[in-house]
């Protein structure tokens, strides 16, 4: 009786059926090691994350813009056009005049290191709902904070509050609530979050905001150009009315002068157009500005199975199946 012909295997000279199993075992073993290594690498990179991602009904979200015009009462018009590369990084702050921790954390924000060519715009939401000690906030500003950042805030502070002072949000994507540290210091946490920047490339973007005042009527016109964004993204523009400085010596945290105060928000229905709008006056003085910003939302939350797997793992995942089926086809002939 003829003995069964042996198949040449790079691992061992063994009978063909056993060789096929060993070949598959080798592929699976190597792939498993690669998966473990890639997951360790991802875990190490996650350790650098010093923030909580903003929760949204969409898979990804953020806030961009910062195109500002002066609403100085001595002027009747102003206009500003900026390319995306010129836009400042937006830092939205939730604060209150009685909040002593807000003074400390704001000092850290003010001392952040900015790389060459990079700028920052600070936007301070003052507590309004059920508030008796802070005169700067408004219903619409508190509503925006709670609607946009409330769900994340509830999950990331021990009290479960939707609007806790102090809180910081960078680029509308990364939130820090209270004074809880993720690293050795809030300085490092905030700097890392600021340096991360927007997850969207804005180099092809541009925006224009114009304001005119005639017979006490304020009219705004605007245009936002985002040619590199596809139809998966939804843009929700608005105009922030910001007071540069307000004087309130009765503030419980002893600051007296409060800056970057968000006084009002004007929702916009499209990425370009014009609108006549009323807005809240400055608390004192004549130092209001209008700032064009927009929330962006990724409208494609389900990218399928591979979309939910990190790139290194998905690449190995596909390679595994190719290798196994290639091996089976090769030795079945």
Image (cartoon, grey):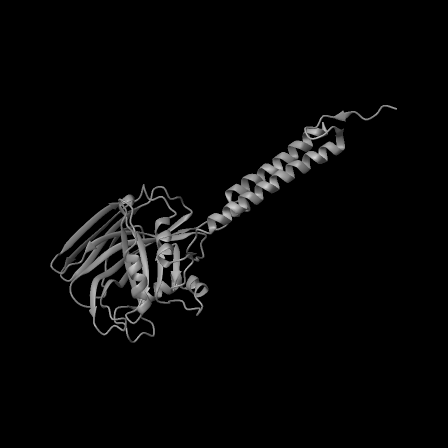
Residue 197, visible in the rendered structure = no
Q: Position of residue 143 (x, y in %)?
A: 35, 66
Residue farthest along the top direction in this orientation: 2
- In the rendered image, the residue lying farthest to the bottom is 132
Residue at figure coordinates x 58%, y 39% from the top left: 318
Examine the rendered structure and indicate whether residue 238 appears above or below residue 3: below
**Percent position of residue 129, x then y:** 33, 72
Q: Nearer the viewer, residue 266 or 115?
A: 115
Name the image quarter holding the N terminus.
top right
In this picture, residue 290 sits left or right of residue 184: left
Side of 137 relative to 200 (left or right): left
Give the answer, above or below, for where 105 lies relative to 59: below
Furthest residue toward right: 1
| Residue 224 visible from this viewpoint | yes
Q: Quadrant of the C terminus?
A: top right
Report the residue that reaches farthest toward the left: 74
Camera-nearest residue between 151 and 93: 93
* Residue at 52% in and 41% down: 312
Q: Residue 22's x, y, as percent?
A: 71, 35
Q: Is residue 148 above or below residue 78?
A: below
Task: Measuring from the top left, give residue 275's x and y in whole percent.
Answer: 24, 56
* Quadrant in the picture for residue 145: bottom left
Between 195 and 270, the residue placed more toward the observer is 195
In the rendered picture of this protein, how many numbered marks are placed on residues? 0
Residue 291 location, quadrant: bottom left
Q: Nearer the viewer, residue 180 or 226?
A: 180
């Amino acid at each position: 009786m003829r003995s069964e012909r042996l198949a040449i295997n790079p691992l061992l000279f063994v009978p063909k059926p056993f060789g096929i199993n060993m070949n598959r075992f080798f592929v699976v073993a190597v792939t498993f090691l690669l998966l473990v290594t890639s997951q360790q690498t991802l875990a190490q990179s996650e350790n650098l994350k010093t923030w909580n991602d903003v929760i949204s009904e969409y898979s990804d979200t953020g806030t961009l813009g910062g195109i500002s015009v002066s609403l100085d009462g001595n002027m009747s018009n102003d206009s500003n056009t900026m390319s995306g590369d010129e836009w400042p990084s937006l830092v939205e702050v939730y604060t209150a005049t009685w909040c002593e921790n807000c003074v400390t954390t704001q000092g850290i924000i003010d001392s952040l290191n900015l790389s060459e060519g990079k700028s920052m715009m600070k936007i301070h939401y003052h507590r309004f709902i059920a508030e008796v000690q802070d005169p700067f906030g408004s219903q619409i500003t508190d509503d925006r904070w709670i609607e946009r950042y409330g769900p994340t805030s509830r999950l990331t502070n021990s009290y479960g509050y939707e609007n806790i002072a102090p809180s910081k949000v960078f680029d509308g994507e990364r939130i820090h609530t209270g004074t809880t540290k993720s690293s050795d210091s809030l300085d490092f946490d905030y700097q890392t979050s600021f340096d991360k920047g927007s997850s969207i490339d804005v180099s092809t973007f541009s925006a224009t905001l114009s304001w005119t005042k005639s017979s006490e009527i304020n009219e705004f016109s605007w245009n936002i150009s985002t040619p590199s964004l596809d139809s998966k993204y939804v843009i929700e523009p608005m105009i922030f009315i910001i007071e540069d400085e307000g004087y309130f010596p009765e503030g419980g945290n002893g600051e007296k002068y409060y800056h970057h105060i968000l006084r009002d928000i004007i929702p916009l229905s499209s990425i370009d157009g014009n609108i006549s709008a009323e807005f809240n006056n400055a608390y004192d003085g004549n130092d209001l500005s209008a700032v064009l910003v927009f929330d962006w939302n990724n409208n494609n939350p389900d990218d399928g199975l591979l979309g939910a797997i990190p790139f290194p793992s998905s690449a190995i995942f596909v390679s595994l199946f190719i290798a196994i089926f290639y091996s089976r086809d090769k030795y079945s002939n």
